[in-house]
Image (cartoon, grey):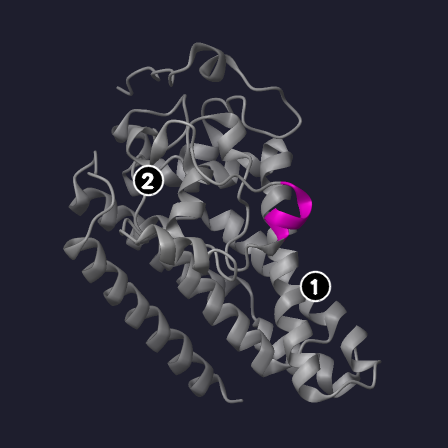
């Protein structure tokens, strides 16, 4: 696989899914947004663009290139087993998704990693661009983890491309502010994380934030007991974000997003802490205004 083909596949799928979800959100929004869309979209898309640029500059070896190196050198579990190519493909995609689930749990469990991941959760609204909003350092760490997992698995290049395109596309899909008929959602969430399922993960309530960790496949939440079917206050009544960051001047501008992990508190969200005052009080705490 050439770098040009890989880039064309990734870019084409990214633009296509983003356009589709933005159109769907315009025609059938699930919730009323609380922050003006131009500000949020400008910041979230700018952060995503900055991450893509810095990732290319800072990480010389892509996951697909690593997969090709692993294949040539017979690295990884799948290169040691005599399995049909189609089965190796399926196993690689599923195993990579499990790794992303475990990585997501890790970023909720370790306070210093939660500080980075908190940028994603501090969005005061939930729409397609939220699925692109991650701190640059988190993106770099995630890339390093995926490189190691690809080498350890011996995942093939096409399996890696398909997985990462699916991951990017489903991240935009399951963060969509879109309406789905209940019957369709109930069926879909057996095979893919839906917006109704993932929206629970963006609740200000700690016990809801620390549930529904899947990005692509929902099976890991079912298997490991982290699944929650719906928010206790309902999808219209739930509050999006984190309880101690409620000022959009702190959570929306691009420079604030980049500085956010290094300022303020982690709140009560890391998994090694008990639910905090925001749950006992039953409503989110307001943060101090930012000068």
Q: Say which residue appears at 64% left-offset and 76% top-offset.
A: 90
Q: For the C terminus, give its image quadrant.
A: top left
Residue tagged by mark 2? 255
* Residue closest to the eye, 50 or 175: 175
Q: Say which residue appears at 26% left-offset and 29% top-offset.
A: 249
* Residue closest to the eye, 140 or 198: 198
Q: Quadrant of residue 202?
A: top left
Percent of width and height locating residue 126:
32, 43
| Magenta residue check for 240 | no
Q: Is 90 situated above or below 274? A: below
Distance, label 1 to label 2, CA atoms, is: 31 Å
Percent of width and height locating residue 56:
47, 67
Q: Quadrant of residue 271?
A: top right
Q: Nearer the viewer, mark 1 or mark 2?
A: 1
Where are the magenta residues, as a range? 220-225
Whether residue 132 is visible: no
Q: Is 187 situated above or below 228? A: below
Whichever of labels 1 and 2 marks the residue nearer the N terminus, that label is 1
SS category of the residue bearing label 2: helix
Percent of width and height locating residue 131:
39, 52
Q: Say which residue appears at 33% left-offset and 15% top-offset.
A: 288
Residue 148 - label:
1
């Amino acid at each position: 696989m050439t770098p040009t083909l890989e880039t064309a596949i990734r870019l084409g799928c990214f633009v296509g899914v983003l356009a589709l979800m933005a159109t769907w959100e315009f025609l059938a929004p699930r919730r009323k947004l609380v922050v003006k869309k131009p500000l949020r979209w400008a910041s979230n898309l700018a952060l995503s663009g900055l991450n893509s640029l810095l990732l290319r500059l800072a990480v010389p070896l892509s996951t697909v290139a690593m997969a090709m190196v692993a294949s040539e050198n017979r690295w990884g579990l799948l290169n040691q087993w005599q399995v049909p190519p189609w089965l190796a493909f399926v196993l690689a995609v599923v195993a990579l998704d499990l790794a992303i689930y475990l990585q997501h749990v890790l970023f909720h469990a370790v306070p210093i990693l939660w500080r980075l991941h908190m940028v994603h959760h501090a969005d005061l609204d939930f729409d397609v661009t939220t699925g692109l909003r991650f701190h640059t350092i988190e993106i770099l760490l995630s890339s390093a983890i995926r490189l190691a997992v690809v080498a350890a698995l011996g995942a093939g290049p096409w399996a890696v491309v398909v997985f990462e395109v699916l991951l990017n596309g489903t991240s935009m899909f399951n963060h969509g502010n879109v309406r789905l008929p209940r019957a369709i959602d109930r069926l879909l969430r057996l095979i893919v994380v839906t917006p109704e399922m993932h929206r629970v993960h963006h609740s200000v309530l700690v016990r809801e934030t620390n549930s529904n960790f899947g990005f692509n496949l929902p099976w890991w939440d079912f298997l490991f007991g982290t699944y929650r079917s719906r928010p206790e206050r309902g999808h219209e009544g739930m509050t999006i974000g984190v309880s101690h960051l409620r000022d959009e001047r702190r959570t929306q501008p691009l420079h604030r997003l980049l500085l956010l992990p290094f300022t303020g508190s982690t709140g009560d969200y890391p998994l090694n802490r008990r639910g905090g005052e925001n749950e006992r009080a039953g409503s989110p705490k307001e943060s101090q205004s930012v000068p």
